[in-house]
Image (cartoon, rainbow, N blue to C red):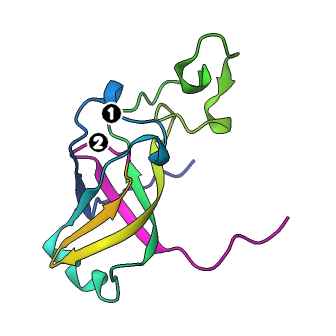
Amino acid sequence: MTSFALRPVGRVESTLTDRSDAPRQPDEGAPQAWLVFDDAVLPALEGVTPGTDMLLFTWLDRGDRETLAVHPRGDRSRPLTGVFATRSADRPNPIGLHTVHVVAVEGNRVQVHHLEALDGTPILDVKPLLGPVPER
């Protein structure tokens, strides 16, 4: 297989510092947070404005890359489930996917609503969320 080199473009600034205290989903009490981008990618933020909904891709750097199955939501009464069928941060490539709403943009800093990522989490990329999800 081919390997890939990813280069973080920034990091998350959040009041969340301990994985055990972090909500598992954004609607479970995740706070506002700041996305702090490296100055080198500042031109990439052109057009990002308050009110924009974005997909945020992070590297869940505290995830266990050897874990292949988990009890969903850490509930041992649930059967072991492969991580590809869960949102677990523990997975072979711990890429986080978050839907965020932009509240403010200040230079290389973007404030977003309801982000469950921990303080210091590397940012890989952001993309605008376009239109409704197509019907299946």
Looking at the rendering, the stretch of residues picked out in magenta corresponds to 116-136
* Residue 95 image point, x, y percent: 46, 48
Q: Does the segment drawn in magenta span residue 72? A: no
Q: Could you give the CA–CA distance between mark 1 and mark 2, rounded to whole angstroms?
A: 9 Å
Q: Would residue 76 be found to the left or right of residue 47 on screen?
A: right
Question: Compared to 109, does 75 lie above or below?
Answer: above
Q: Secondary structure at mark 2?
A: loop
Prevalent SS, magenta region = loop
Using the image, determine if residue 120 lies above or below residue 5.
above
Amino acid type assigned to the residue bearing label 1 in the image: Arg
Q: In front: 92, or 113?
A: 113
Q: Quadrant of residue 86?
A: top right
Task: State whether residue 81 is above or below residue 116.
Answer: above
* Residue 103: quarter of image: bottom left
Q: Amino acid at mark 2?
A: Leu
Q: Place residue 37 in its image quadrant.
A: bottom left
Query: Callout 1: helix, strand or loop?
Result: loop
Instruction: Identify the residue shown where x is 53% and y is 20%.
Output: 74
| 28 versus 123 height, above or below | above
Residue located 67% across and 17% down the image: 80
Q: Report the side of 47 relative to 43 (left or right).
A: right
Where in the figure is residue 93, as x and y percent of width and height?
48, 42
Badge 1: residue crowd in 10 Å (few <14, some 14–19, many ≥20) = few
Q: Residues within 10 Å of mark 2 (few under 14, many from 20)?
A: many
Tell us which disc is closer to us: 1 or 2: 2
Q: Mark 1 vs mark 2: which is more N-terminal?
A: 1
Given contact means CB atoms under 8 Å apart, are the residues at marks 1 and 2 in contact?
yes
Looking at the rendered structure, which numbered label has been put on residue 62? 1
Residue, disc 2:
118
Residue 4, given in percent of the width and then of the height, sits at 44, 55
